Image: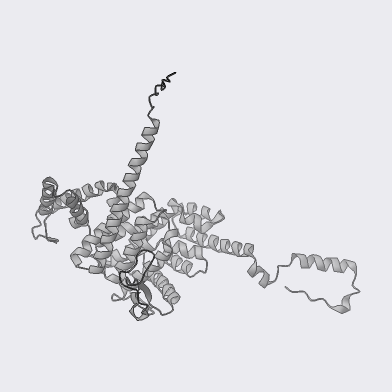
């Protein structure tokens, strides 16, 4: 509130003046001052986060007390983001058979929270996007999808994220500049003299301009979910490990789980390096024949399905163990779904971060390694050249990174063992001097 001094009241008593000044002292500062005050902005953000977290705790079962206690921290949204117990509660609620309907209060909470201008709250909603999209796509493409309840709640959250990304792009496509090898760079010099011809520059379109959508149609489902995952990728470096693990496990399940081709590239390269080892090649060939596959297609004989699955799992486990990946990370979620490029492109991009992000845990890297190999097998069956090239590159980079890490660990171990080994005392040298 602004106070204006009236010149005609200069003769007011000192008591009145002191009272007025005291009242003015306790008045809030003008709005322009509060808007520029970082302390006020921080407190307003914390108040919003606490309010949303308390409303979330009211939607969860009696164990929601663990979530409500997080509202008392200095950074409520970040505390919720890094809480394993809170994730377990929210994950169980989202995975409930009755979740995802239009009347689902948790989906309504996610939708309303994402509409907030607070970046921490929006980040919190995005962290559950892999779980939400994984459950949604798995239910839509499950065999008994006709008997499932409406998934309008899941679709409302996905549409909110899609609309936000479409607004940020402002009707423009996502472009990438393709390098021109005829022009010099930091990494190479062209053989022929470089010609500055800007007309030769090539531009690739990663994603076309986004159209507005008010409902999720079956023909637009892939682009809507894929765009939402693009939005997730923008913040993937800030996502907790559990969110990335969920994404990797769903990606492996979406590709399909019953194909030994997921380790074909690893085996082919290993066999090539072994220079045609008969035992290694014969063992792999036997497993491929026993697994019921011929040129990537499962045979029609289904009498030994259980045996085939056991053999396939054995092949996969052996190859994953060779890469140093724990067998527990082979656990997957969801079901096999269609994977058009609009959906597969952001999936591959996120998996690339999960594989090579410097701050990712080893569990995340191992799960991403399994998912990439599953998707490579799927792309090989679907004859998708874009996906095959991208996933093949990720697999080779992953193998090189793991080999380099193993070599570095071996060198470090040898160096430490040599340092701890006591050296024999050298005999003093005796110099003979002639007189």
Depth check, front residue: 13 or 38: 38
Note whether residue 200 is visible.
yes
Looking at the image, residue 309 sits to the left or right of residue 4; the answer is left
Quarter of the picture holding the N terminus: bottom right
Looking at the image, residue 112 sits to the left or right of residue 321; the answer is right
Note whether residue 153 is visible.
no
Count of residue discs = 0
> What's the residue at 35%, 74% (across, down)?
194
Image x and y of residue 126, in percent: 42, 64
Location of residue 154 (image quadrant)? bottom left
Depth check, front residue: 154 or 276: 276
> What's the residue at 30%, 50% (across, down)?
329
> What's the residue at 11%, 56% (across, down)?
292
Depth check, front residue: 52 or 165: 165
Depth check, front residue: 258 or 278: 278
Looking at the image, residue 26 sits to the left or right of residue 423; the answer is right
Image x and y of residue 326, in percent: 29, 47
Location of residue 160 (image quadrant)? bottom left
Asked if residue 332 is positioned above or below residue 411 in the image, the reply reads below
């Amino acid at each position: 509130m602004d106070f204006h001094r009236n010149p005609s009241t200069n003769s007011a008593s000192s008591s009145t003046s002191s009272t007025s000044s005291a009242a003015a002292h306790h008045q809030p500062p003008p709005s322009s001052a509060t808007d520029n005050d970082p302390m006020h902005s921080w407190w307003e953000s914390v108040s919003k986060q606490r309010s949303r977290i308390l409303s979330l705790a009211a939607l969860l079962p009696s164990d929601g007390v663990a979530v409500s206690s997080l509202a008392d921290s200095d950074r409520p949204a970040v505390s919720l983001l890094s809480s394993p117990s809170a994730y377990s509660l929210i994950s169980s609620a989202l995975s409930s058979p009755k979740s995802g309907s239009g009347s689902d209060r948790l989906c309504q909470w996610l939708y309303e929270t994402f509409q907030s201008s607070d970046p921490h709250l929006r980040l919190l909603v995005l962290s559950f996007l892999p779980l939400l999209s994984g459950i949604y796509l798995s239910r839509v493409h499950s065999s008994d999808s006709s008997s499932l309840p409406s998934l309008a709640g899941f679709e409302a959250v996905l549409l909110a994220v899609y609309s936000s990304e479409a607004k940020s792009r402002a009707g423009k496509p996502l472009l990438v500049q393709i390098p021109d090898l005829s022009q010099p760079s930091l990494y190479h010099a062209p053989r022929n003299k470089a010609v500055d011809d800007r007309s030769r520059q090539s531009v690739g379109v990663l994603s076309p301009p986004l159209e507005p959508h008010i409902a999720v149609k079956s023909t637009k489902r892939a682009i809507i979910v894929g765009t939402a995952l693009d939005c997730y990728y923008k913040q993937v470096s800030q996502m907790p490990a559990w969110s990335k693990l969920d994404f990797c496990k769903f990606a492996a399940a979406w590709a399909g789980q019953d194909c030994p081709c997921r380790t074909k590239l690893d085996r082919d390269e290993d066999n090539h390096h072994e220079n045609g080892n008969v035992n290694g090649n014969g063992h792999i060939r036997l497993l491929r024949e026993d697994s019921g596959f011929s040129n990537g297609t499962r045979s029609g004989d289904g009498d030994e399905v259980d045996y085939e699955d056991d053999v396939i799992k054995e092949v996969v486990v052996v190859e994953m163990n060779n890469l140093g990946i724990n067998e527990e990370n082979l656990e997957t979620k969801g079901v096999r779904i269609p994977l058009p490029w609009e959906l597969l492109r952001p999936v591959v991009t996120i998996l690339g971060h999960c594989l090579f992000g410097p701050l990712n845990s080893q569990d995340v890297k191992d799960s991403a390694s399994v998912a990439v190999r599953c998707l490579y097998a799927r792309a090989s069956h679907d004859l998708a050249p874009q996906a095959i090239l991208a996933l093949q590159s990720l697999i080779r980079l992953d193998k090189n990174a793991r080999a380099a890490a193993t070599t570095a660990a071996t060198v470090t171990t040898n160096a430490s063992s040599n340092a701890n080994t006591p050296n024999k005392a050298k005999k003093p040298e005796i110099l003979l001097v002639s007189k």
